[in-house]
Amino acid sequence: MSPDKKQQEKVRLHARNKNREKYDLQALTLSNPELKHYIISNRCGVDSVDFSNPIAVKLLNRALLNHYYGIKNWEFPAENLCPPIPGRADYIHHIADLLAENNFDAIPLGNKITCLDVGLGASCVYPIIGVVEYGWKFIGSDIDPNSIASAQNIIHSNAVLKGKIECRLQEKPTAIFKGILDKGDKIDVSICNPPFHRSLEEAQKGTRRKIKNLSGRKVKTPELNFSGISGELICDGGEYQFLQNMIRESKEISKNCYWFSTLVSKQSNLNGVYKLLNQMAPTQVKTIPMATGNKSSRIVVWTFLSLEEQKEWRETRWETSGPPHQRKG
């Protein structure tokens, strides 16, 4: 690989991430012609997307899903969170590697894998990437019926997603798994991107800082450049309280799920997360570092299954059906 090629790569992204290289704006504007109206020259005089504009961000991510994943219809209300596709894809790829570590370095593919997305959102992004990349099945939960309806519309509007994603409404806003999983449900992995702000004021403060970094402008009352209704970005107690609820509930369904996982955006929350996990006594805990652009994050994963239970799970669920496995790398 040439030095120029290396410089163009977003080297911190996962090796299988389709967005590892710099955005091909010509190809993306062909996928979504509206995007060309939001291409600007950045401080270095290079063409770029206006990341401080929520419309531009949504059009970019729609183009990425169309160009790289074949998703032709991706519509959802403007007030809902517009997630950055590269970061969401990285989470899915790291989870695929996690499953491979328990499967002789072979990623289990197809509908043998069932993934629970806690906080599906109106955009349905994690299931989209997991279905397209690995053929997995998904259950998606959300506390907002409008987000469930939006996700279902996306599923029904794209043939590749039909029959692969089941949406379930969480009727108890503070619950995570309760009311979503039945006693007989078996989940190979749960994923989650928790709301991480305690209040609207905190969310706006973060957005003001982001807009200033992106454009140099000071904005008193900013428009969130990734949008997001309150339930997607804000919860009582912030990210840490949400994670506490999740970890405690995971103990109650310890034999229904092989791996529990969650993003932990704030490093300051890690010690508390580890302490609570230690109290719940899982058999394994791992932390997977993750980074996109200048932002560093991590995925914390845990399981309550013994080594013998893990072996039985793998042999009965991962090695008896579905398409061939994919090797890591």
Image (cartoon, helix red, strand yellow):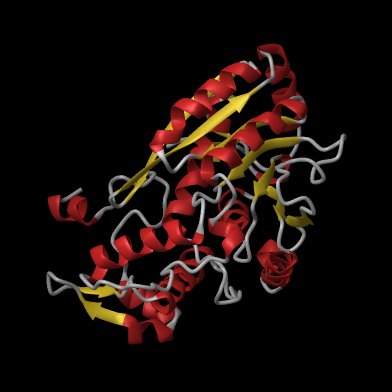
From what the image shows, is residue 136 above or below residue 96?
below
Q: Nearer the viewer, residue 251 or 305?
A: 251
Asked if residue 84 can be seen in this view, the reply is no
Q: Quadrant of residue 146?
A: bottom right
Q: Is residue 199 left or right of residue 186?
A: left
Q: Position of residue 40 (x, y in %)?
A: 24, 80
Q: Is residue 155 left or right of residue 36?
A: right
Number of numbered discs visible in the structure rendering: 0
Q: Position of residue 111 (x, y in %)?
A: 72, 45
Q: Residue at x 30, y 67 (%)?
A: 211
Q: Nearer the viewer, residue 211 or 62?
A: 211
Q: Position of residue 101 (x, y in %)?
A: 53, 26
Q: Is residue 207 left or right of residue 113?
A: left
Q: Position of residue 278 (x, y in %)?
A: 57, 17
Q: Residue at x 66, y 64 (%)?
A: 160
Q: Quadrant of the C terminus?
A: top left
Q: Residue at x 28, y 61 (%)?
A: 22
Q: Quadrant of residue 245?
A: top right
From what the image shows, is residue 77 above or below residue 270?
below
Asked if residue 52 can be seen in this view, the reply is yes
